[in-house]
Image (spheres, rainbow, N blue to C red):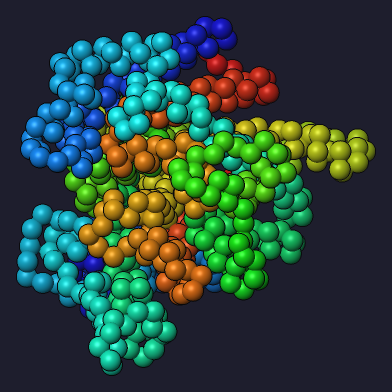
Amino acid sequence: MPGSTPASAMPDEAATGGVVPVPAADALSGPAPGPGVPRAVGRFLRRRPLGALGVAVALAMLAASLGPPEPRFGLPDLPDRPLGFQMGRPFLARYGPEDFFRDDSGRLARFQPPSGRHWLGTDDKGRDVWARLVWGTRRSLFFALWALVLATVGGTAVGLASAYFLGWVDMLVQRLMDGLQSFPPLLVLMLVVTLTEPSLRVLAFALAVVALPSVQRVVRSVVLAVREEPYVLAARALGASHLRTMLRHVLPNVMAPVLTVFSVGLGSAVLAEAAISFVDPSTVPQSASWGIMLAEGRAYMFEHPHVVLAAGGAIAGAVLAFNLAGDALRDVLDPRLRVL
Amino acid sequence: MGRYILARLLLNLLVLLAVASLVFLALRLSPGGALEAASQGVQGDLEQARQAARRSLGLDRPLWEQYWDYMSGLARGELGDSFRTRSPVAQEIRERIGPSLELGLLQLAVALLVGVPLGVVTAVRRDTWPDYVLRVTAVLFLGVPSFVLAIFVLLFSARYLGWTPPITTYRDLAPLPPFDTPAPEDPWLNLQVMALPALIGGLGTAAIVMRFLRAQMLEVLRQDYVRMALAKGLPGRLVVLRHALRNALLPVLTLAGLALGTLAAGNVVLESIFLIPGLGLYAVNGVRQNDFPVVQGMTVLVASFLVFVNLLTDLAYAWLDPRVRYA
């Protein structure tokens, strides 16, 4: 989270900049969030308990992946510099992902049961399972966020333009998207990483490209309906340019499905990273990953199941949480889309 | 309609051409890995070994010549020879497509056999406790990825229920490497190998089918013609199955088509857990070993399958629903 909000700032204050809005300005900027936001949150909690649970798990993941900022800046990179500054050891992890431990007699502390020192025990290399799980959360979450932000921004732009202009633009763009979609996704992702460099950043970009067609398809289908609305014609008649019409009059009306696609997509992105790391742990081996833990734990899962249970539980829990949150978000934001 | 099909077929051909060219170029941009793999284990001068590998793999020829070879081969249905095994990729794919196809079709069968009845039940018994229980279960199955589910099933059956070995795999049938046994002829044995992976892979899709069908059914059950059918005294069962389900199933068809498309690639994850020598593992190993012809062949194969299935789905849609017309 960039910056920090004072604990006293309520969501409604934050949304209006903490200043009581002048009525006239308020009228211009549309309906103010006002005191309705906490009430809406309360209603969400009551009506969508499962969705709220999903949101809570997602927030817990975010909390688990945060660490103290270090004064080292640079191009954003995954997993430890997702926002442009280096993040240190996650607050929730007491050890590094590769730290290994020895028992009292000096031997490698392999397969220790859960204890006060190692909350989830240790793995075959004497590493702390809980610490690796927390580091893996950072990798998983920021990977998913990166890929989905890129895919959503790109997909929205493409879908918006394609449906707004229709005609040969639409024809061309859609066939291009068909072509993009006919690549087998897992194969493409692994191929890109093998051919370039084994980095999460490259993998996230590749996933964004692979996911873009589905995002733009949803956006396009909604824009097709919105573009026929009288207010779009009115905007054009008043002399608004195509760009202005698209951004100010069409885009705001497709934000609900865009947000829904984003939140559901996060689950799929977490899944994709876990699946690739599981199938071939050497794809991006640099940091602790749930998929890698699952793959490594398989070798000794019948004797020491705690590693696969922890990693598998984390993957399933995260995907489930994002699905629940996405479902609830869709119901709240856009009842028309409830069909799925 | 004829013109539409023709146009789509031509476009599909273009898409496939583009896909094939793109993969070809992407691989040729960084041939280092392939040379590395081919010159591995060679004693002596590494640079010399790399040169020899480049020559023997045909990577020293001009790009356009390689491209022409590859494209004209495609037109004849040839996919080139694998860099690693030196045998034709088309033949290797033919040997491995059986298990993948079988696993995929079984998964789809599980998805439909489980998903469709449950979708109908949840829609008809809307907001009763079976509906709630089934919907929550469906969300659970959606959230648990098949490879996690597979590992948990294996773990629990072996450790807590005491089944050891928990399942029969291909490796049990041929306990010596290279493990590429053909599918067992005996249908009973075959089913034993495939049942668990098909069930585990299919249940996730079943959950999607169920949720989708439920929403469609609710939509259709609100329609006037359903009320009409009930009003004229048709038994409710008949109305649900004949009038409602038939129309609600249409969008599920698209879903099934998409599922069929993805299964053409082989289910990498299930194949690797259950040691099924199918196309998914073949493709992944091709990528790992920088085996260009294998990667090219698999990409083109999957792409053609996908565009073909998409076209079929659209046509079936138009055929089943007279309201859908393609200009």
- The reply, left or right, for residue B62 in relation to residue B155 is left
In the image, residue A72 lies at what x, y percent? 7, 66
- Choose between A144 and B198: the one closer to the eye: B198
In the image, residue A16 lies at what x, y percent? 26, 65
- The reply, left or right, for residue B134 in relation to residue B291 is right
Q: Extreme top residue here?
A: B3
Does B115 appear above or below A26? above
- Choose between A43 and A217: the one closer to the eye: A217
- Choose between B44 and B201: the one closer to the eye: B44
- Choose between A256 and A299: the one closer to the eye: A299
The residue at 26%/12% (across/down) is: B68
Q: Extreme right residue here?
A: B233
Quadrant assignment, res B50: top left
Residue A218 in view of the camera: no
Does A239 appear above or below B181? above
In the image, residue B304 lies at what x, y percent? 45, 23
Residue A117 in view of the camera: yes
The N terminus of chain B appears in which quarter of the rendering? top right
Q: Extreme bottom residue here?
A: A104
Does A152 appear above or below A132? above
